[in-house]
Amino acid sequence: MMAFNLWLVFLMAAAGLAVVPGPNSLLALSHGARYGHQRTLFTICGGVMGFLILISISMFGLGAVLKAQPNAMTGLQWVGAVYLVWLGIKLWNAPAIELTKLGDSQLQSPANLFRQGFFAALSNPKVLLFFTAFLAQFIDPKQALLPQFIVIAVTFICVEFIAEYGVARVAHRIRPKLMCNGQMFNQCCGMLFIILGVSMTLA
């Protein structure tokens, strides 16, 4: 089972990833403005299901690598640190989020909303790269992989669900703020990932 202090570090990393603007967060923002937060739950559920598949692929693949080559852990830790810093710099320099005006649109079926969220998650390489690079920080190859997988998967999915649902609920209220202060938002997210990346090399 994952140690509590290690789980807290993972929780911070998951929270940082959840607030980074990506396909699913923007989809929750758009659908929340169009259809309301309750209907957007179908979109969010599709997204977290896609994330669960990505986590499973990356985690069990990484577990096999670590069992075969334990020395690969150090290399993955440095790859993870470099990726976090790179992501932070990219986010810092990213342009502000822009939202086009939403016109009237016919309500989509729950199944269609679910599919959009599901495929948005699967088409997002950021999540797969994140977990492939950084699960070495949180997995103990000497312990059973399944309990660690359950803790990591449930933690990430809960954080992602809460973040996206929060975005959907306040979509109408934050649209003007995102347009005016989107650059500051990106810089805050970027700084968070740079700090996490540097801390990985010092741990």
Image (spheres, rainbow, N blue to C red):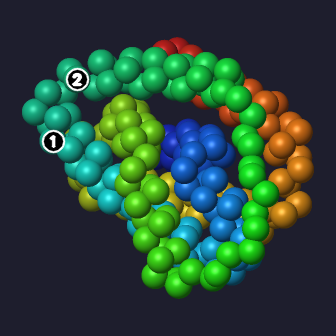
SS at mark 2 in the image? helix
Q: Position of residue 25 (x, y in %)?
A: 62, 54
Instruction: Specify the quadrant of the image occupied by residue 170.
Output: bottom right
Of residues 136 and 30, the one nearer the viewer is 30
Residue at 55% in and 55% down:
24
Q: Nearer the viewer, residue 47 or 133?
A: 47
SS type, badge 1: helix
Q: Position of residue 73 (x, y in %)?
A: 28, 26
What is the number of the mark on residue 6?
none
Pointer 2 or 1: first along the chain: 1
Q: Which picture quadrant has residue 103?
A: bottom right
Relative to 5, is 1 on the left or the right? left
Q: Which mark is residue 72?
A: 2
Q: Quadrant of residue 136?
A: top left
Q: Is residue 96 visible?
A: yes
Q: Specify whether 40 is left or right of 140.
A: right
- Image height of 57 relative to 200, above or below: below
Q: Which residue is mark 1?
A: 64
Which three-letter amino acid code belongs to the residue tagged 2? Ala
